[in-house]
Image (cartoon, grey):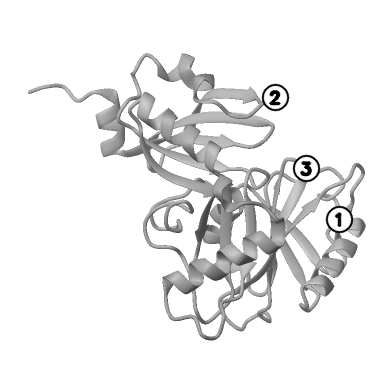
Amino acid sequence: MRKPTLPSLTRFLGGRLELTLTRASLSLALRRTAWGASVSLVELPLASTFHPDMLAPTLAAGHLAGLPLSVTLGDDLVRLFMVAPPGNARGLADIRAVTTLRFQRLYGEDLAAWRLTFDAAVDRPFLACAMPQALHAALLDLARTHRLALTAITPRFVTAWNAEHRRLDGAWLGVAQEGAITLGCVDVPPGEGDAGLMAVHRLALPPGADARWLRDQLRAVALRHGLADPVAVKLVGHPLAGLAASTTGTPTLTWQAPVPRPTAAQAFAYLFGWGQRAG
């Protein structure tokens, strides 16, 4: 009997490659089993746009060919926005049309340069995401060149939302990364069920930002989106200097470690991942 190769055995055990990209950094890790810890293969600062050749020294030998590849994109690489469906929406074509119009009104750009994906709904506001077509093409080229199975491209905020939204209990979600926090604003009183996402807001962190500054910004964000002030915010990521020390005040601020990469049970449909969406 032919001995299984490393990629085939790793894939059988639920292993995969995990690529994380932001504007400023790149990291590639190997998770040999679905339940095991990941092993870092590459960590690089980025001074320019991502190009597949950046990973050629690690992947060119072909030892990892055949493995699934999941990609997590920093929220600074994508555009996340909410869309309110019209009352007369009848199907996916209507939803796509209103999402396209919403993108153009928000950003004033030609959609041809962007890849648009959304969590379609006709009865509630839904999340949409646009990623640069050039970045999508580069990731497809990376997978094709090195014979990897590209299974998920997921914004960092979406990964965190999928993992946490059922446990928010009325709190807002804040995802910290690269000097900013992406806020998922909800409008569900504590104890009254699953959180419904009402707004997404990206908040840049100035030097010296502290808990008092953040609380002031949270109230301003709530006012801007017509929401009640949050009573609590769950912050996901590595605690930031100035924001980690304060445990008193309203809204309460709590931190937890970064969530894992997307799994089939968590992720939205591709671009947001693969498999059935959570929530």
| Res. 18 in view | no
**Pointer 2 residue:** 47
Q: Are marks 3 and 2 in contact (CB under 8 Å)?
A: no
Snapshot quadrant of residue 32: top left
**Image vertical order of residue 2 relative to residue 93, above or below:** above
**Pointer 1 residue:** 246
> Left or right of 62: which side holds 206?
right
> Left or right of 196: which side holds 229?
right
Residue 20, position as x, y percentages in the image = 56, 36
What is the CA distance from the residue labelled 3 to the residue labelled 1?
Answer: 19 Å
Mark in front: 3 vs 1 = 3
Mark in front: 2 vs 1 = 2
| Amino acid tagged 3 | Gly
What is the CA distance from the residue labelled 3 to the residue labelled 2?
Answer: 16 Å
**Image vertical order of residue 140 relative to residue 239, above or below:** above
**Pointer 3 residue:** 179
Q: Secondary structure at mark 2?
A: loop
**Image vertical order of residue 100 relative to residue 39, above or below:** below
**Image vertical order of residue 110 relative to residue 225, above or below:** above
Residue 203, position as x, y percentages in the image = 79, 54
- Identified at 76% across, 47% down, the residue is 180
- Identified at 86% across, 55% down, the residue is 246
Snapshot quadrant of residue 81: bottom right
Judge by depth and name the residue closer to the eye, 229 or 90: 90
Residue 106, position as x, y percentages in the image = 71, 61
Residue 218 is tagged as: none
| Amino acid tagged 1 | Ser
